[in-house]
Image (tube, grey):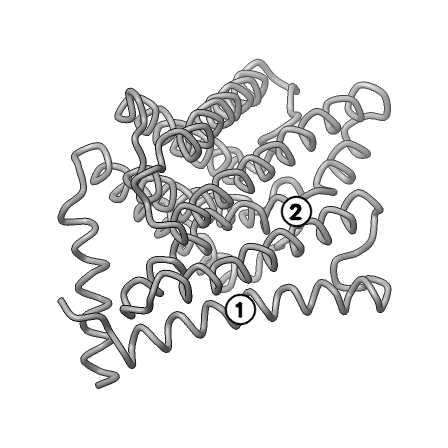
Amino acid sequence: MCLRGATISAMRIADIAVRARPVEKIAYVVAAALVVAGLVHVAILLATGASWTGPTSLRKAATFGLSFGTTLASVAWVTSLLRVRARALWLGLFTAACVVETVLVSLQAWRGVPSHLNFATPADAAVAATLAGGGAVIVVTGIVFGAAGFAGAAALAPDMRLAVRTGLVVLLVAFAAGAVMIAHGTVMLRTDGPAVAYATTGFLKPLHFVAMHAVLVLPALAWLLRSTGSDDARRLAVVRVAVVADLLLTALVAVEAFAGIAPLAPPPALGAATALALAVLVATGVLGAVTAIRRPART
């Protein structure tokens, strides 16, 4: 039964790609390529023993590839569930921006120079300006998709509607965190120099990371629960628990980031609350996956 459930779940995942519209298929292919590029850089870091820290580390190429790849795939899938005006245009812009951001960051990492806040040469300044422009495109498309989550989600089941709307809103929090970091770094660069700017710009990275992937985690949970054949009320209850846990986790990580608290060394009470929120979120995902495998809905 477990093997049959896993096979059915895998077939449903493949079916998403098969039924995808052309712009979605392109996004999925590009997302896969970005993830592979990120994994290649991880392998290079492990094989060479190169540094994982600093503004010139290949870690940036790895994290940008993995993060933008998974986010692009998530956004392509989630927005396929919504009514979005000129969706092909917006998803195409989002896809292009993800590629530009990842490629330029990787290029600068291989050149051994910072990708952001680097105006040392005309070429570096052009890269920094292009990255800023790409970030602006990502924010604008994120706002468009976020609005569609409320205006174009009426046909979705209540649990999926809640998951999609929450995921897209939290994704905007991730984009806002990235914009704040760049703005902060720009100010520090002008007032205190590049050393201070590079050392302090990433203070919202934990928030940026946690918020970036809610758009995958929550809708994926709702999709898994639907594949079990559970009734609407039960699915909605589980998704509500996951949403509360995700929002609480995001808020707690934001408090830590803005307070300058190291993510791995928070005060006991804050650390316990963060761990509890994460544990509940993980538990809902495990519940959905196990139930989908053991008790798949009839096809």
Residue 157 vertical placement versus 89 (above, below): below
The tag on residue 282 is 1
Q: Residue 265 at x, y = what percent?
A: 81, 64
Q: Residues within 10 Å of mark 2 (few under 14, many from 20)?
A: many
- Looking at the picture, tell me which residue is in the foreground, 218 or 89: 218
Q: Residues within 10 Å of mark 1 (few under 14, many from 20)?
A: some
The type of residue carrying mark 1 is: Val
Farthest bottom residue in view = 1
The type of residue carrying mark 2 is: Leu
Q: Secondary structure at mark 2?
A: helix
Image quarter in which the C terminus is found: bottom left
Residue at screen point 44% across, 60% down: 43
Q: Secondary structure at mark 1?
A: helix
Image quarter in which the N terminus is found: bottom left
Q: Mark 2, mark 1: which one is toward the viewer? A: 1
Report which residue position mark 2 lands on. 207
Q: Alpha carbon of mark 2 to alpha carbon of mark 1: how far?
A: 18 Å
- Looking at the picture, tell me which residue is in the foreground, 191 or 163: 163
Q: Residue 144 at x, y = what percent?
A: 43, 25
- Looking at the picture, tell me which residue is in the foreground, 121 or 238: 238
Residue 118 vertical placement versus 102 (above, below): above
Q: Residue 210 at x, y = what percent?
A: 59, 51
Residue at screen point 32% across, 45% down: 156
In the rendered structure, are the residues bearing label 2 and label 1 in contact, judged by CB atoms less than 8 Å apart? no
Residue at screen point 69% across, 30% down: 180
Residue 131 vertical placement versus 278 (above, below): above
Would you say 264 lies left or right of 40 here?
Answer: right
- Looking at the picture, tell me which residue is in the foreground, 166 or 274: 166
Residue 159 vertical placement versus 91 (above, below): below
Q: Earlier in the sequence, mark 2 or mark 1?
A: 2
Residue at screen point 46% across, 56% down: 217
Would you say 276 lies left or right of 269 here?
Answer: left
